[in-house]
Amino acid sequence: MRTFEVEIKYRITDITKLELQLRHWGGSGFGGEVTDCDTFFQHPCRDFVQTDECLRLRNRILSDGSSEHSLTYKGPKIDALTKTRQEIEIPIAEPHHWESLLNALGFCKSASLHKFRRRLTLTLNHRQIDFVFDTLPALPESSRLFLEMETLATEENLEECRTLLLDIAGQLGLSEPIQESYLNLVIGHLFFQQ
């Protein structure tokens, strides 16, 4: 059975107001800030930019200084409002060996990105929803804050999960979802600076 990550992302300016609303819904507080250091790879035989796919090696540095590593494939987005797509994520050890393996198979490193994250998980409508506040230091200070909401779904409950996230966004006063990946936002910003 395929698993889909149903995700919706918004650029935000007022974290405090959103945190208060999430606490009102039962959130007890966010976990410590983590740093995600992501390395993206290009396929040797197809252009992931054209196919809207992603292969990512992630080094997550936790608030206590320890690290977690994962290798993630994300398939093409399957709707126009959310960032719903198939996701296969594998926890790994020794990420430098994985990078060597990918290089040996013809994958080449295409870009790197890092961001700071704080996560809160709530159960709403009997479904676990992750609320993630992200800061992208590579973007201007006025436009570097984001809120992602995400949950996991199967093909059977995909539409129900999309509808739920859009409804929650509306209750939070968020109305303009962003389809672009963080990597594309940063690349676009750097391009316009030149």
Image (tube, rainbow, N blue to C red):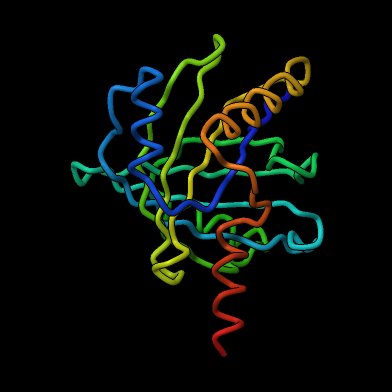
Residue drawn at x 23%, y 43% is 63
Q: Is residue 29 above or below residue 104?
A: above
Provide residue 30's location: percent of width, then percent of height: 30, 33
Visible residue check, residue 82: yes
Q: Is residue 28 left or right of residue 104?
A: left
Provide residue 182's location: percent of width, then percent of height: 56, 58
Q: Is residue 170 above or below residue 68?
A: above
Q: How many marks?
A: 0
Residue lying furthest left: 64
Residue drawn at x 62%, y 67% is 108
Q: Examine the image and state in which quarter residue 183 appears.
A: bottom right
Give the camera-side residue of 101 and 24. 24
Image quadrant where one finds the N terminus = top right
Give the camera-side residue of 68 and 152. 152
Image quadrant where one finds the C terminus = bottom right
Residue drawn at x 80%, y 40% is 79
Provide residue 152's location: percent of width, then percent of height: 60, 25
Q: Is residue 80 left or right of residue 124?
A: right
Residue lying furthest top: 126
Provide residue 165's location: percent of width, then percent of height: 62, 29
Residue lying furthest bottom: 194
Q: Is residue 87 above or below residue 179?
A: above
Visible residue check, residue 45: no
Residue drawn at x 62%, y 73% is 188
Q: Examine the image and state in which quarter residue 135 appears.
A: bottom left
